[in-house]
């Protein structure tokens, strides 16, 4: 019989968005005693931020920009953070020029040397370049069907081949379709109604989310470290689903990144780049993008830190790779997961989906609601004991 300090209602594996939201909801709304663990020495998962050795607030795992159209998501997160308005802008370096992304009227004018007076003219010009496709089978189709081959080759092919080590024709159509095509001059990277950053950073937001009397947090802790000693009727698993099942059906592939950082003196608080992120679609340049964090955080400082992203196959699992054979393998793992009433699989790695932060929050909120409903738990009831799974 485990001693009381090893007894919990729920064990949450992973202190990122999926784990953080599930833990808070289960602890607060259902009065359950929750242990949250993460193998990393910090909370916030891939959204972690912290000051570097120069005091510049950086995002440890690459730039994270919060944007959403889901009011339920901002309502939930706003309990743990104030917000700082921020509209993200990304420029791409192409053949010695800097052009805005996603493709808009100015991108086309700069790369094709044409004058496009109105949105209608821009739409008609793109239609003259587009290669129509009956169905969008892959990420090449998604782009050439809208903007034609030249813009595809100059902006998408090289970047995608570097990022995924696959040709766009081998990737799901939705990957490149994440970027819209605009006929006007709107040069914001995202079109969502809510575009703001947590004012004191993501990590602070997570510290507040996990600060609850029913939640205990153990960092630097592997699932394997606790599974024998901790007793919990329910597990929330937010790590890779294939890892949970001991890779018994084979490994799901993930894409990783290697980050190289550079800090420059910026007296008077000036900035190095004109915008937060510059993309480098050229395949001869080994990195994909360079981020200057102070654009994102609004911090004024005499130093500025930039991160170069080098895609790799090795390292932490950052990106599930959206292609049909991977989805098929995932579905086989999902069938195993369906047999485990005692484990709730939530988040980008546990569901093997290329999700943004707000989508993970929304998924976690729904997952907990459904899980509680299936067990007849009433919200905010503060029941202390978890009934046996049916
Ligand atoms: P994670 O954040 O990966 O959290 C899972 C946690 O589980 C990890 O901390 C891991 O250490 C822990 N864990 C796993 N297995 C174990 C184990 N066995 N034992 C203990 N701990 C374990 N989204 C946006 O909305 N906007 C952006 O601008 C954006 N930019 C991104 C940039 C990059 C480079 C990347 C990689 C992602 C970006 N995202 C962005 C996506 C965002 O990071 C994810 O949607 C979100 O962080 C996923 O949260 P999660 O909880 O599902 O997973
Ligand atoms: N993409 C590209 N060129 C760019 C930007 C994006 O080819 O300059 C493609 C690439 O395949 C990338 C996908 O579009 O993986 C989605 O881009 P996004 O910026 O959403 O990627 P993320 O921020 O998730 O890494």
Image (tube, rainbow, N blue to C red):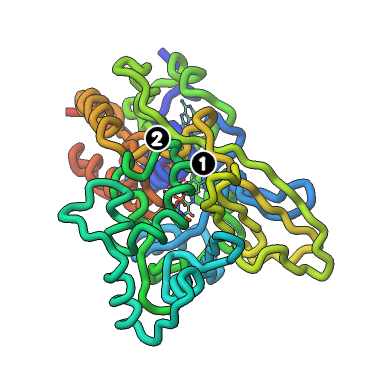
Q: Earlier in the sequence, mark 2 or mark 1?
A: 1
- What x and y, as percent, mark residue 16? 47, 42
Measuring 26% from the left and 27% from the top, which residue is drawn there? 329
Whether the residue carrying mark 2 lies under 8 Å from ligand 1 is answered with: yes
- What x and y, as percent, mark residue 161? 45, 42
Give the quadrant of the C terminus: top left
Question: Between 271 and 156, which is closer to the camera in this rendering?
Answer: 156
User: Would you place residue 383 above or below residue 189 in this image?
Assistant: above
- What x and y, as percent, mark residue 129? 31, 66
Q: Mark yes or no: residue 349 visible.
A: yes
Query: To which residue does mark 2 refer?
Result: 238
Whether the residue carrying mark 1 lies under 8 Å from ligand 1 is answered with: yes
User: Would you place residue 312 above or below residue 83 in this image?
Assistant: above
Give the quadrant of the N terminus: top left
Label 2–label 1 contact, CB within 8 A: yes
**Residue 353 in the figure: left or right of residue 302:** left
Query: To which residue does mark 1 refer?
Result: 45
Question: Between 345 and 252, which is closer to the camera in this rendering?
Answer: 252
**Residue 127 in the figure: left or right of residue 110:** left
Q: Mark yes or no: residue 277 visible.
A: no
- What x and y, as percent, mark residue 79? 46, 60
Question: Between 234 and 313, which is closer to the camera in this rendering?
Answer: 313
């Amino acid at each position: 019989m485990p001693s009381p300090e090893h007894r919990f209602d729920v064990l949450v594996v992973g202190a990122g968005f999926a784990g953080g939201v599930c833990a808070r909801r289960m602890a607060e709304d259902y009065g359950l005693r929750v242990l949250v663990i993460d193998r990393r020495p910090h909370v916030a998962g891939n959204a972690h931020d912290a000051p570097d050795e120069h005091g510049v607030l950086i995002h440890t795992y690459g730039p994270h920009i919060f944007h959403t159209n889901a009011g339920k998501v901002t309502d939930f997160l706003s309990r743990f953070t104030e917000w700082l308005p921020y509209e993200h802008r990304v420029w791409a370096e192409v053949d010695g020029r800097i052009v805005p992304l996603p493709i808009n009227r100015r991108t086309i004018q700069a790369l094709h040397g044409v004058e496009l007076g109105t949105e209608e003219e821009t739409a008609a010009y793109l239609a003259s370049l587009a290669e129509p496709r009956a169905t969008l089978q892959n990420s090449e189709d998604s782009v050439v069907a809208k903007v034609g081959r030249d813009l595809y080759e100059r902006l998408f092919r090289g970047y995608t081949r570097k990022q995924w080590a696959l040709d766009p024709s081998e990737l799901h159509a939705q990957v490149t379709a994440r970027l819209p095509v605009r006929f006007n001059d709107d040069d914001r990277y995202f079109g969502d109604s809510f575009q703001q950053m947590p004012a004191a950073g993501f990590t602070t937001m997570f510290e507040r989310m996990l600060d609850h009397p029913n939640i205990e947090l153990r960092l630097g802790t592997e699932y394997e470290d606790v599974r024998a000693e901790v007793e919990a009727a329910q597990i929330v698993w937010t790590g890779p689903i294939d890892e949970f099942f001991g890779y018994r059906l084979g490994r799901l592939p993930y894409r990783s990144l290697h980050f190289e950082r550079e800090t420059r003196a910026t007296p008077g608080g000036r900035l190095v780049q004109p915008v937060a992120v510059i993309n480098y679609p050229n395949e001869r340049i080994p990195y994909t993008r360079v981020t200057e964090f102070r654009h994102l955080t609004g911090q004024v400082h005499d130093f500025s830190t930039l991160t170069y992203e080098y895609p790799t196959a090795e390292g932490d699992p950052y990106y599930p790779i959206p292609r049909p054979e991977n989805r098929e393998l995932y579905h086989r793992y999902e069938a195993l997961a369906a047999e485990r009433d005692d484990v709730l699989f939530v988040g980008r790695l546990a569901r093997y989906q290329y999700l943004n932060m707000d989508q993970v929050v929304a998924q976690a909120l729904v997952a907990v609601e459904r899980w509680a409903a299936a067990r007849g738990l009433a919200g905010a009831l503060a029941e202390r004991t978890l009934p046996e799974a049916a």
